[in-house]
Amino acid sequence: MIGPSQKKLPNIVVIEGFWGVGKSTLITNIRQSYPVLFIPEPNYISAGIKTGISEWYRDQHNERMKLAKKYIKFGENVILERSILSSVAFYYARHGFMPKWFDQSKLELSSLNNIHIFFLYNDKNSFLKNYSEIKDRSVKSAMAKESFYYNYFNFFAKIVPKLINQKIVCVKISKNRYQPDISGEIKKILSDNHSEKRKMKEIKHYCASAIMFYDDKFLLLYSSKHRHFSLPQGHRNEGEDLASTILREIKEETGFYDFEIIMPIDTYGFRFYNKNQITNKIITCFLVKINSLKKNKKGFEAHESYTNHFFTAHNAIKKLNWSEDKEAMKRAQNIIMSNKTMSRFKKTGHCVL
């Protein structure tokens, strides 16, 4: 029986699922409309791990769960993309039996009465289509087995509920879209039994980012330090409006100076834990047209180092690291393809702010 103090604990939501079913999109939707702390999925490629990859993932998932438990003690709801269950599911789907090392993790998950696990899946034909885009050779090799799809699905649908005594909500995806009520269901979970007062200070930072395009290509910045692609972006200085912020950041980070802001296309935010406080980063994203590729010398700050790269919208979405940036890129692509504002801009050169 759950005691009164336990009822007030915030919740941990875990989004599991097949590859390419919209886990990141769902999490983005939740994060943009509910104050929740997000713990992203680990990535062995960006982390530079070359050996012992399976063991590394297990360690990462266990550390992430410890972090989630820490956050809820501070009064915060938490959402994770994947958990230790992903590692177990992959092993089971590949070999057809459970790994011996799962016992300890199983007990830890069983002890959490405020954890909610959602499994997103699609039909086998859609699964095989998504399989063709996976770059990891070891993953593709395992997924090629006839039994992999059914083993992975049955692990979450039938085995996990019995193993850890937790209900798994299985959500079938149609055409890479989750059911419309799933976001509402998760928001309700995050609203229920929330502690009355958070224990950490929250600081807001206002920032601007840019989707920049030249002809039919989009500009991304690559950080050799962090080993990922991102959009030009930066914090608003005192006395600046956000349009001025992105004008300054573009010149500093890309070197381009012959460009025009078309319009703001999105505002999104995310919260994360840093130095014993919550940072709430609120970003306004602008659509920016590059008129020419003339450049000045970049004006990096000490901690910055980026190189410019142009991609098609499809490849840019795949390259971007953060789900919020991916969604902004999709929105920009739709505007350029279908919005009449763009055709008016081409004729008049008018800048819409």
Image: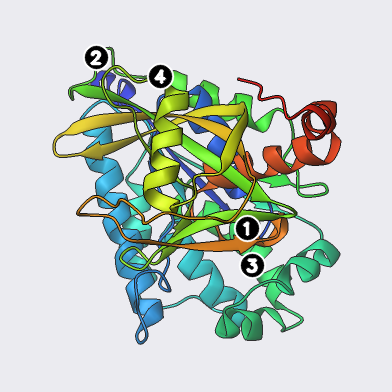
Name the kind of residue labelled 2 in the image: Lys
User: Which of disc 3 and disc 1 is earlier in sequence?
Assistant: 3
Q: Nearer the viewer, mark 3 or mark 4?
A: 4
Residue 204 is left or right of residue 260, and the answer is left
- Identify the residue position indicated by label 2 in the image: 197
Q: Nearer the viewer, mark 4 or mark 2?
A: 4
Q: Determine crowd level at label 4: few under 14, some 14-19, many 20+ residues with C-alpha closer than 10 A.
A: few
Please provide percent x and percent y for residue 190: 45, 25
What mark, if any, has residue 241 been given in the picture? 4
Name the kind of residue labelled 4 in the image: Asp
User: Which of disc 3 and disc 2 is earlier in sequence?
Assistant: 3
Please provide percent x and percent y for residue 208: 44, 32
Name the kind of residue labelled 3 in the image: Tyr
User: Which of disc 2 and disc 4 is earlier in sequence?
Assistant: 2
Q: Pick the residue in front: 70 or 303.
A: 303
**Helix, strand or loop at disc 3?**
helix
Please provide percent x and percent y for residue 306: 38, 60
User: Which of disc 4 and disc 1 is earlier in sequence?
Assistant: 4
What mark, if any, has residue 67 been given in the picture? none
